[in-house]
């Protein structure tokens, strides 16, 4: 490296309606207000060619078999890898709304695909410096605006996803943050962790994901 400090790759994960998009937007705003160069990245990115197909699948306007949609979500991340790497190396901190972990968790709870099979195509994508898991309690989950009509927006699926995220967070030692508080309380907790990480990454090299089991 040329001594230029790179940006941090920050990922926010959690079940549907845990407040990820709200929090990611606020994190970018607060970082910018502190003169930290930051940008928002969202997965799935519904604006790309694979994203258009994913959007139709989620809205149940088209059908794809489980394996095919899994690979579409992964391809949607691969499409953005080069741009993300370029921005990080230019010193831009990326706040990422869902990433490979959503890909692995939502697909593998369907049971017909093993975790190992789901992980494989994610290997080689950029490895986050920090993963923040938003955890929503049962009591709070029922208070959030109703699920919409997208394909995974049902209680049974979300409970399986919540459990899979909890298991993964223990194994990978993520930062777990309660999503039950008000928007500002959750934001403050996340921002503290993000600012600490941004100041730590400095000139550290970027790594890639390497799931092995
Ligand atoms: N998926 C995704 C895969 O299967 N594989 C993959 O690889 C990827 C990347 C769409 C689906 O795709 C699946 C997972 C999903 O099922 P999406 O586009 O991220 O993924 O989903 P969205 O519908 O856009 O977002 P979510 O449903 O996940 O919601 P968020 O972003 O967690 O929540 P947010 O911020 O939009 O807030 C939801 C509501 O709650 C309120 C908000 O105002 C909003 O109304 N709210 C709060 N209310 C009270 N207290 C708080 N603290 C609140 N924070 C937010
Ligand atoms: Na969202």
Image (cartoon, rainbow, N blue to C red):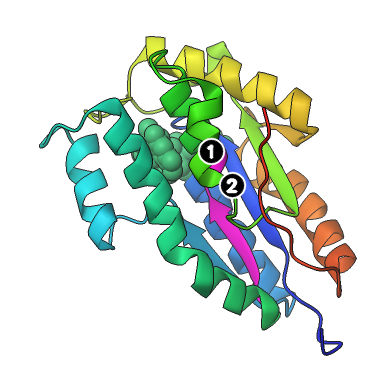
The location of residue 155, given as percent across then percent down, is 38, 12
Which residue is denoted by mark 1 in the rendering? 120
Residue 113 is drawn in which quadrant? top left
Q: Is residue 200 left or right of residue 168?
A: right
Query: Is 29 or 3 nearer to us in this picture?
Result: 3
The answer to whether residue 99 of the structure is visible from this angle is no
The answer to whether residue 190 of the structure is visible from this angle is yes
Mark 2 neighbour class, 10 Å CA radius: few under 14, some 14 to 19, many 20 or more: some
Circle 1: element type: helix
The relative height of residue 178 versus residue 162 in the rendered view (above or below) is below
The location of residue 4, given as percent across then percent down, is 81, 86
| Circle on res. 123 | 2
The location of residue 20, given as percent across then percent down, is 53, 43
Residue 100 falls within the magenta-colored stretch? yes
Instruction: Magenta stretch: give its range.
Output: 92-101
The relative height of residue 172 versus residue 122 in the rendered view (above or below) is above
In this figure, what is the number of numbered marks?
A: 2
Mark 1 neighbour class, 10 Å CA radius: few under 14, some 14 to 19, many 20 or more: some
Q: Between marks 2 and 1, how big is the CA–CA gap?
A: 6 Å
Residue 71 falls within the magenta-colored stretch? no
Q: Quadrant of the N terminus?
A: bottom right
Q: Residue at x 60, y 59 (%)?
A: 95
The location of residue 175, given as percent across then percent down, is 77, 37
Residue 202 is drawn in which quadrant? bottom right
Residue with the most extreme left position:
61
Q: Tell me if label 2 and label 1 are in contact, CB under 8 Å.
A: yes
Residue 119 is drawn in which quadrant? top right
Query: Is 46 or 191 nearer to us in this picture?
Result: 46
Query: Is 201 or 179 nearer to us in this picture?
Result: 201
Q: Quadrant of the C terminus?
A: top right
Q: Residue at x 50, y 49 (%)?
A: 22
Q: Is residue 8 left or right of residue 160?
A: right
């Amino acid at each position: 490296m040329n001594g230029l400090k790179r940006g941090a790759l920050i990922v926010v994960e959690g079940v549907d309606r845990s407040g990820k998009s709200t929090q990611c937007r606020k994190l970018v705003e607060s970082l910018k207000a502190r003169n930290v160069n930051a940008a928002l990245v969202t997965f799935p990115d519904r604006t790309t060619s694979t994203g258009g197909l994913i959007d139709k699948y989620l809205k149940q306007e088209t059908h794809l078999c489980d394996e095919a949609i899994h690979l579409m979500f992964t391809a949607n991340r691969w499409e953005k890898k080069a741009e993300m790497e370029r921005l990080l190396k230019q010193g831009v901190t990326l706040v990422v709304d869902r990433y490979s972990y959503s890909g692995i968790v939502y697909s593998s709870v369907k049971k017909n695909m093993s975790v190992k099979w789901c992980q494989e195509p994610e290997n080689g994508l950029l490895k986050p410096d920090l993963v923040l898991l938003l955890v929503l309690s049962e009591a709070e989950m029922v208070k959030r605006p109703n699920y919409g009509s997208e394909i995974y927006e049902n209680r049974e699926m979300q409970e399986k996803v919540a459990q899979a995220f909890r298991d993964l967070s223990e194994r990978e030692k993520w930062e777990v943050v309660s999503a039950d508080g008000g928007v500002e309380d959750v934001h403050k907790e996340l921002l503290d962790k993000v600012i600490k990480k941004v100041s730590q990454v400095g000139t550290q090299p970027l790594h890639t994901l390497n799931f092995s089991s």
